Amino acid sequence: MNLTAPIFHDNDAAREHLESIRWADGVYCPHCGNTDGETIRKLAGKSTRPGLFQCNACREHFTVTVGTVMERSKIPLCKWVLGFHLYASSKKGMSAHQLHRMLGVTYKTAWFMAHRIREAMKEDVKSSGPLGGEGKTVEADETYIGKRETPRVHRKGYPYTKKGKGGGAQKRIVVGLVERGGKARMFHLNDATASTVRDVLVRNVSRDTTLYTDSSRLYTSTGEEYASHKTTNHSAGEYVRYEGDETIHSNTIEGVFSVFKRGMIGVYQHCGEAHLHRYLAEFDFRYNRRTALGVTDRERSDDLIRGTTGKRLTYQQTDDAAHS
C-alpha cells in the first residue's frame, strides 16, 4: 500500500474505505441489526456530518464507527486507517511513541489508540475453532519474559524463589501453540503447572492432533490424551529427531517466540503485565496472516479493520488494567 494514498490523508476517502470493508454486503444498523437497505437512509444537508445514516426500524442514527473500537473517538478517520496499516504491516510492532510521531497525535492518544488496535486484533477462539485435527501437528512450548510485577507466591504462602527454565520463577509466563503451516496462539499464565498448561491445550487443540513438545514434565500426562505425543530432549542437545516421515521438533513455536521477544525487547521495551495479553494478540494476529501464507499488507490491514466491529475498549478499562 502506498502511504501517499488518499485513505491515509483524506477523511472522506478514509470513511469510504472503512464503509467498503465493514459494509461489503450492504449497510446494516449496528443498534438493532436491521439489514433492510430500504429502511436505512443516508442523511444529507449542510448541518449533517458526513457518513451519517438513520435506521427507520429503530430510529437511531449511526456512522461506520458505531459499534467498533473507533466509536466516540475524535481522532480523524484517516489517522485511524493509517494506524491500522502500520500495525498490520510492522512485523515486530510499533511503539506508541512512534505512532505519536507519525500520526501527529499526543502520546496519550497514541497509547490508547494502540491498545484499541490490539483489541481489534484479538481472535475469537470460539468461532475459529481448535488448532490441529486428524493428520495435523501442533507444537507446544512455554517461554519466560520480563519481570513479574506481582511476585509469584507459593501455595503455602511464602515467596517462590526456585530457579527454573528461562531465568527464574519471577518472570512472566507465556505458553504458545502453533499448528505447522497454520496458526499460532499465545497465552499469559499466572503459573506454569501441568494443570494450567493442560487447560490451555485441551481448550485450544483438537484431541486428534499429533503433539510435539520438549521433554518438560508439564506435557507428560496431557500428551497421553492426544493422538500422539512425541518429544525432543533439549537438555541432551537434541532439538530435531527423525522417525520415518516425521520430523519431530518444537522449532516452529520457538520461532514464534523469537519474533515476539524481539518486538517486546527491541520495540516496546516495557509492557505492563496487565496488558501482556493484548500484545500477545497483536503478534498472533500478524503471524496468522503472514506473508508465507500468501497474505499481503493490504489484506492484513483490511482484516484488522473487519476485526474492529463488535469491540469496545474505553480509556477507563485500559487505565484500570494499568493500575490493577
Image (tube, helix red, strand yellow):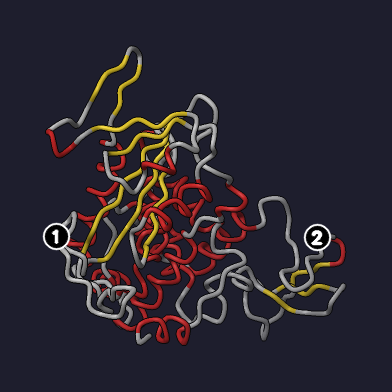
- For label 2, the residue is 35
Q: Using the rendered image of the protein, determine whether residue 154 is visible from the camera's viewpoint.
A: yes
Screen quadrant of the C terminus: bottom left
Would you identify the image quadrant in which residue 154 lies? bottom left
Q: Nearer the viewer, residue 221 or 186?
A: 221
Q: Nearer the viewer, mark 1 or mark 2?
A: 1
Q: Nearer the viewer, residue 287 or 2?
A: 287
Q: 172 above or below 291?
A: below
**Left or right of residue 212, residue 238 in this image:** left
Percent x, y for residue 98? 24, 69
- Of all residues, the one furthest to the top in this rendering is 244
Q: Residue at x 26, y 39 (%)?
A: 215
Q: 303 above or below 62?
A: above
Q: In the rendered structure, which amino acid carries the disc numbered 2?
A: Thr
- For label 1, the residue is 167
Element class at badge 1:
loop
